[in-house]
Image (spheres, rainbow, N blue to C red):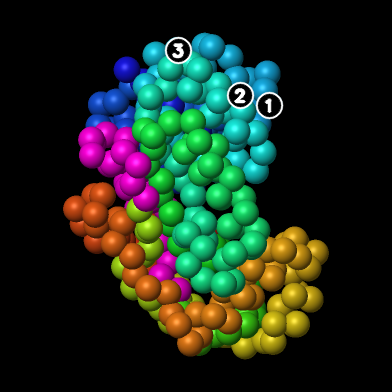
Amino acid sequence: MTILVTGATGAVGRHLTGALAAAGEKVRAVSREPRKAGLPDGVDVVGADLTASSALTADLFDGVDRMFVFPFEHGVDDLIAAAVAGGVRRFVVLSSLAAAGEFPRDIGSASYTHHRAVEQAVTSRTDAWTILRPGTFAGNLLSWAWPIKAGLPIRAPFLHSAQAPIHEADVADAAAAALLHDGQQSRIHPLTGPQSLTRIDQVATIGAGIGRDIPLVEISPDEFRADVARFIPEDIITMLLDYWSDTVTEPDRVRPGVRDLTGRPGRPLEQWVRDHRPDFTGA
């Protein structure tokens, strides 16, 4: 039988597709631009925009028994309805730790609202689901890549807030384990990196990984808002500022999901920096 991977060329999907192929699984990977997918040989790469109902054909689900659900901005409800009708029997859903609603800041936030709807699209139709709720991705630190490459200081608020950034490959490995092993039905796994680090320590880790000091300037929330307003929607800015503000006094807790699913601790931030060194150096 075949595993269908949606969002297959994203940060998680690319690692997941590779891990499943390496395990000898038959994989159908969906990409909007299949010629640019760059996925392993032997993977059935399908060109489709799954947010469009016209892409949800019977052929897409032919022979598929398991599916990785990427949280597309639109169209997930129709996608899951078509998948269930097409015979998919098991779903692993990429969600967000915000969807747990553990903190007042989460309730009603952009991430909470979106990911709860994605989860509901699956859980309302089947009991054969596993939900992965990663916290902050280490990949979010790529927003600092441009000033670092340009030799400029990083301007950031709440430098003493602490998060536990997770490597995208750990999310993919957790997803692979959930897809390949039994016993995960109707289970939710919170995922984080293995260590909670202040934003000062995160910058220092990047600096150590690229071999130079990175200047860091603390700015106010209003200054941050002014810096990024052209690029980030207002609801996302508010969500980020609330998150960073809260994690000054209550740092992110390290969650056990990666170890529970894979049997090993998650990759440290140092490893993520090594894997992404060219993003910060341009070489």
Q: Residue at x 55, y 21 (%)?
A: 82
User: What distance separates the C-alpha of mark 2 from that of mark 3?
Assistant: 15 Å
Q: Position of residue 204 (x, y in %)?
A: 44, 80
Report the amino acid beneath label 3. Answer: Asp
Figure check: 78 above or below 282: above
Report the amino acid beneath label 2. Answer: Ala
Task: Specify whether residue 170 is painted magenta.
Answer: yes
Mark 2 and mark 1 residues within 8 Å of each other at the beta carbon: yes
Residue closer to the observer: 119 or 210: 119
Q: Is 76 left, or right, of 64 in this rendering?
A: right
Q: Name the residue carrying label 1.
A: 52
Q: Residue at x 42, y 22 (%)?
A: 88
Q: Is 93 left, or right, of 128 in this rendering?
A: right
Q: Name the residue carrying label 3.
A: 62
Q: Is 233 left, or right, of 180 in this rendering?
A: right
Q: Residue at x 47, y 59 (%)?
A: 100
The magenta stretch is: 163-188
